[in-house]
Amino acid sequence: MGGHPYTPNVAQVTADSLIGRLVDGRYEIVARVARGGMATVYRAQDTRLNREIALKVMHPHLADGDQAASFRQRFEREARSAAGLQHHGVVAVYDQGTDGDMRYLTMEYVPGTNLRQLIRDGDLTLRRTFAILDVVLSALAAAHTKGIVHRDIKPENVLLEEGTGRPKVADFGLARAISEVSNTTTGTVLGTVAYLAPETISTGHVDARADVYAVGILAFEMFTGRLPHQGEGPIQVAFAHVNSDVPPVSAFAGHLGRPLDLLVRALTARDPGQRPRDASVALDALRNTFRQIPNEVLDIPAKAAPPPSAAAVKAARTAVVERPPAGQWAAQRPPAPPVQTEAAPARRRRGGRILLAVAVVAVLLGAWWYTEQGPGAYAVVPDGVVGVTAQEAEDVLTEAGFTPSSVKQHDSEVPEGEVISVEPAEGLRWERDRPVRLVVSLGEELAEVPAGLVGMRERDARTALRDAGLSDVEVSREYTNDAVAGEVIWASVRDGDMVPTDEHVRLTVSDGPPPVTVPDVAGLGVDDAIGALGAEGLKVAREDRFNKETPAGTVIRTQPGGGRGAAQGSTVTVFVSKGPEGSVPDVVGLSVEDATAVLKEAGYTVAVRGFGELLADGVVETEPAAGERLKPGGKVTIWTL
């Protein structure tokens, strides 16, 4: 189908009834991306997995009438095959399904552009072209191994990720299901005619070699910026595929040489038996050709390449491609000018010498401009630098004409000695006289676990770990009778071990002995309450309060309250009732001194009787008795022995 299948199209049609629809109760359609003869592609949100996807909806006419069941079976079969194809250069197919009469595929959404736009821009260098073709053939090789033939290789189906520029091949699995129905119902051959193999056009036969032919046409277009066969309509182009060989690429781009002619001729041989049998063989041929091309040719942008001569273009229709001597780069050159056979006047000879001198100066100036200011002053940072050893990366950069430099840093994921990143990034244009910086891994950074963590106070343990380079620390707490609160009782790392600096260290810190439950002594006499609290190992502090609802000498409440937890050996405050305000407090059992203080606080005067004060005995009786009403200012006599 025409247009970029999975990346935004500037000229989108906004009026679309499917926008906003929830397909199959899961996929919410957000916007239309592209529409072609076979399907419409939408950007959608997978509400179940919360991710952005591309939703491809087949046009209803593909499954009309008697062919509905047949198309559905083929469509589902091919979608399952494509979903099983896992490769970094393939747009992943997630799911297929139906919603009413709608047949759809869900697949990876690739924001960015496609190869068609890159060809139109004219910025492709040979190095970039070979890198893209390498991924395309690698993806096809993975498919051919599984018996899957793409059937519709073209620039629109090669997507380029936004930011990275990495290529991905789209539309695996769809072409076969559609083409079988189309052939059955209309007797026509499905496909973009500019990339169809001769045998597909003439007999309808398609196998892995048809994909190889399409890649050959794609390579021709990337090398030259044009298609090999021109025509007023699809029929004329199809006729040319069947009856004419693809011309040499060197005839249309003056900087290209014979190895590229031989590569394209092999991929686009009209006899399928003369082509590589599948994409894996074609990939080997591509890589062998790449090794034959000089660096200064690899990095010339297509729009900056020297043009071919008119004679070379004309001769391309009948030219025979010859193999150059081994190791020699044979670039296309225009035919030599005719030899002067008549004697020229001396004036013409002098003019010729002047023109020759001017030409030499122009060539020298052109060479200076090319290498110092023009395309020769720049090169593209090659792929294959990140993820290899530093020495391998330096060799690749040196071969590309760059001066590598390197810095080292620790990395927990990249093995020691391998390249973490390159600055500028792979695929970017860079001046040759500026160094390319490699960041090389030192491997995991290790730290030594400090000694004596267990037994340290929590704060000291955290400080020791931080000083050692270990800052990711998690602390949990538990009660124990064997350690004081705040002391480390367990660590996930052992003293002296060497561990990565990003190690997650876990410490267990003591919260002291487990708490006890405060007995509920409200309503008990003060002596009984004190005894019950003491039996739990708790200390007691007493406070007396007026309380009209609780009899004098009875516990009103405790702090902490009954049923609450308290640390072992901690103090519980017992609030004891003095009865209602205006009644004699209960001071029996207190010392004379304490009893006097309580009575005076209640507003009474005190008289002491008996010998108990001399003997340091406590109060045995009061008059009036505890709880009896007595106006403030009245006298209370306390009796001792």
Image (spheres, rainbow, N blue to C red):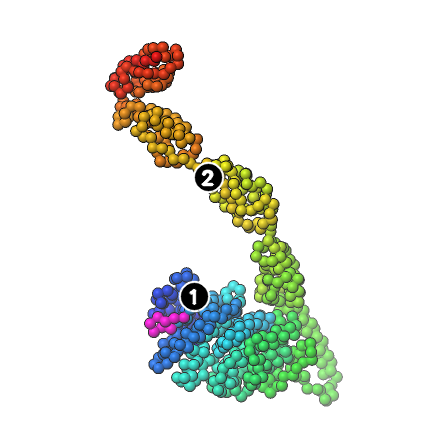
Side (left or right) of 556 relative to 96 = left
Give the answer, above or below, for where 574 lies relative to 175. Answer: above
Which quadrant is the C terminus positioned in? top left
> What amino acid type is highlighted by mark number 2?
Tyr
Q: Residue furthest bottom?
A: 342
Residue 594 is drawn in which quadrant?
A: top left
Q: Which residues are magenta?
A: 96-103
Q: Secondary structure at mark 1?
A: strand
Report the front residue among 161 and 469. 469
Report the front residue among 49 and 124. 49
Side (left or right) of 79 relative to 120 = left
Residue depicted at 42% across the width and 78% down the height: 178
Residue 372 position in % (x across, y down):
65, 66
Residue depicted at 64% across the width and 66% down the height: 396
> Circle 1 sits on which residue?
53
| Residue 227 magenta | no
**What kind of secondary structure does the magenta stretch mostly adopt?**
strand
Residue 155 position in % (x across, y down):
50, 74
> What amino acid type is highlighted by mark number 1?
Ile
- The disc at residue 479 is 2
Give the answer, above or below, for where 14 lies relative to 566. Answer: below
Q: Can residue 230 be seen here? A: no
Residue depicted at 35% across the width and 82% down the height: 66
Give the answer, above or below, for where 555 lies relative to 593. Answer: below
Residue 40 is drawn in which quadrant?
A: bottom left
Residue 8 position in % (x across, y down):
44, 68
Report the front residue among 399 and 117. 399
Residue 67 is drawn in which quadrant?
A: bottom left
Q: Can residue 268 be seen here? A: yes
| Classed neighbour count for the residue bearing mark 2: other residues with Cα under 10 Å, few (<14), some (14–19), many (≥20) | some
Q: Secondary structure at mark 2?
A: loop
Identify the mark nearer the N-term, 2 or 1: 1
